[in-house]
Amino acid sequence: MPAKIYRPAKTAMQSGKAKTHVWILEFDQAIPRKIDPIMGYTSSADTRQQVKLVFETLEQAEAYAKREGIEYRVIQPKEPKRQIVSYTDNFRFNRLQPWTH
């Protein structure tokens, strides 16, 4: 069963970077999910979808997958592009857009 190894992205709700420095090994969906006709719940017989293994480094995650014989793919994280903006540029004389409130 294939798996993916990735580093989670920063949550959009907070400005901090907690829990983004670990690597996660997560199994892919092997059996499609079914909708229960009475209750409307979504269920699956595949219990590996519930497993998320956390590692401190990518090398540890890859070593575990190789040791256990798990086929895996690595999804490299995208580093955010930080735009440096100065607060004083809001009050610049030659500003491109006029200052309005």
Image: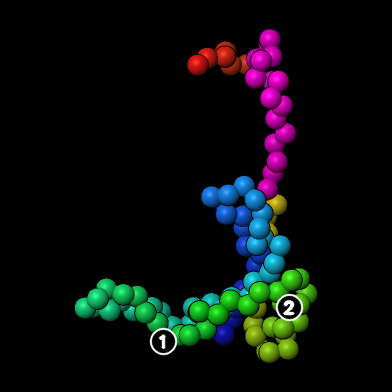
Q: Amino acid at mark 2?
A: Glu
Residue furthest to the top in view is 93
Q: Nearer the viewer, residue 88 or 7?
A: 88
Q: Is residue 91 above or below residue 26?
A: above
Q: Is residue 25 above or below residue 79?
A: below
Residue drawn where x is 69% and y is 44% of the image: 81
Residue marked by disc 2? 62
Q: Earlier in the sequence, mark 1 or mark 2?
A: 1
Q: What SS does tag 1 mark?
A: loop
* Quadrant assignment for the N terminus: bottom right
Is residue 91 highlighted in magenta? yes
Q: CA distance from mark 1 to mark 2?
A: 26 Å
Residue furthest to the bottom in view is 68
Q: Is residue 7 above or below residue 28?
A: above
Residue drawn where x is 62% and y is 58% of the image: 9
Classified by dominant secondary structure, the portion drawn in magenta counts as loop
- Whether residue 84 is visible here, answered yes or no, is yes
Q: Nearer the viewer, residue 63 or 89?
A: 89
Residue drawn where x is 21% and y is 78% of the image: 38
The magenta span reads 80-95
Are the residues at dot 1 and dot 2 in contact (C-beta closer than 8 Å)? no
- Whether residue 73 is visible here, answered yes or no, is no
Q: Position of residue 98 (x, y in %)?
A: 57, 13
Residue drawn where x is 44% and y is 83% of the image: 31
Give the quadrant of residue 90: top right
Q: Position of residue 23 (x, y in %)?
A: 68, 69
Q: Amino acid at mark 1?
A: Ala
Residue marked by disc 1? 45
